[in-house]
């Protein structure tokens, strides 16, 4: 893999270079850039497979740099200090990111993922989602990118009816009868859908309250969804659920 590192902090570049040395049989750093302008020039010159891109840089940030490129036919891993809003944006768009300081296990995951990926036809759509989210601090965000075994599914959030846990994976059901097996935990999905009318009614179930038809009393009770499906409510979640109606 041909790699370019773009970061305005020399220490961050050196740290990442040192971490990448553990993968020297699989990767080759072809350029190290201290600014977005240098990054654009290096991308055009080297045609990389993967770039590590800092977000906050003086003059032009990482997002602005990407918008200036004519085409994006390489993988992107954003590197950033902790920023909850940015992290939510990455999750919604299914973009890869690393928190500084970068640790080995997280780096290995993104390197392995890049090695397995032959092409990235969805990268432009992912970036559109990401940019839309980042430009509007309170987005009425209509679409989410869901990582499945086959690739990515772009789904309208309001069409998601309910989500069901399956260990480290999640089944997601839509009003059109679609069923997606997503490589995210239910907790991850809950975070991604926060603020969009979803409520955790059980350890294994997340429901869009806009698709709820009826509540049936019981120790915890059950929800009847508009599509006829029954979803159990745990006793610990019952009180919080009923406050919503």
Image (cartoon, helix red, strand yellow):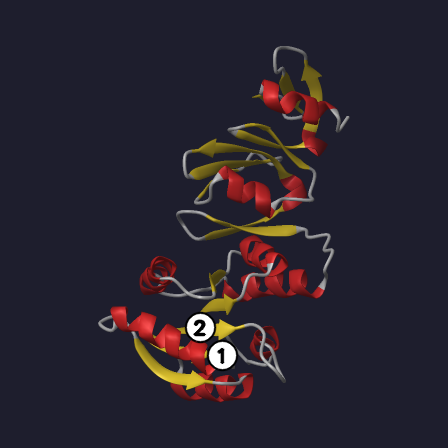
Query: Residue 7, which numbered label?
Result: 1
Q: Residue at x 36, y 64 (%)?
A: 114
The secondary element bearing badge 2 is classed as strand
Residue 216 image offset from top left, x and y in percent: 67, 13
Residue at the far top in the pictured view? 218
What is the distance, in whole Å, between disc 1 and disc 2 at their CAs? 8 Å
Which quarter of the image is occupied by the N terminus? bottom left
In this view, the residue in front, 114 or 122, is 114
Q: Residue at x 62, y 24 (%)?
A: 237
Residue at the far left in the pictured view? 25
Disc 2 designates what residue? 52
- Asked whether, in this view, residue 215 is left or right of residue 54, the answer is right
* Image position of 191 with respect to 37: above or below: above
Residue at the far right in the pictured view? 245
The secondary element bearing badge 1 is classed as loop
Q: Are marks 1 and 2 in contact (CB under 8 Å)?
A: yes
């Amino acid at each position: 893999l041909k790699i370019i590192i773009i970061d305005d902090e020399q220490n961050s570049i050196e740290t990442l270079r040192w971490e990448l040395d553990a993968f020297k049989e699989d990767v080759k750093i072809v350029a190290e850039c201290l600014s977005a302008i240098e990054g654009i020039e290096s991308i055009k010159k080297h045609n990389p497979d993967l770039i590590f891109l800092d977000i906050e840089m003086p003059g032009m940030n990482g997002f602005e740099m990407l918008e200036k490129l004519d085409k994006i036919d390489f993988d992107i891993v954003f590197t950033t200090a902790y920023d909850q809003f940015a992290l939510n944006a990455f999750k919604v768009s299914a973009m890869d990111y690393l928190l500084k300081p970068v640790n080995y296990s997280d780096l290995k995951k993104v390197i392995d993922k890049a090695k397995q990926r032959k092409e990235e036809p969805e990268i432009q759509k992912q970036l559109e989602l990401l940019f839309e989210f980042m430009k509007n601090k309170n987005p009425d965000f209509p679409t989410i990118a869901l990582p499945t075994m086959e690739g990515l599914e772009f789904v309208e959030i309001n069409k998601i009816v309910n989500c069901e846990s399956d260990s480290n994976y999640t089944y997601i059901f839509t009003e059109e009868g679609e069923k997606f097996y997503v490589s995210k935990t239910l907790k991850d999905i809950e975070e991604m859908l926060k603020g969009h009318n979803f409520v955790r009614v059980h350890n294994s179930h997340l429901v869009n309250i806009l698709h709820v038809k009826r509540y049936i009393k019981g120790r915890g009770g059950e929800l009847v969804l508009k599509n006829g499906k029954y979803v159990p409510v745990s006793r610990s979640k019952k009180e919080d659920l009923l406050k919503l109606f």
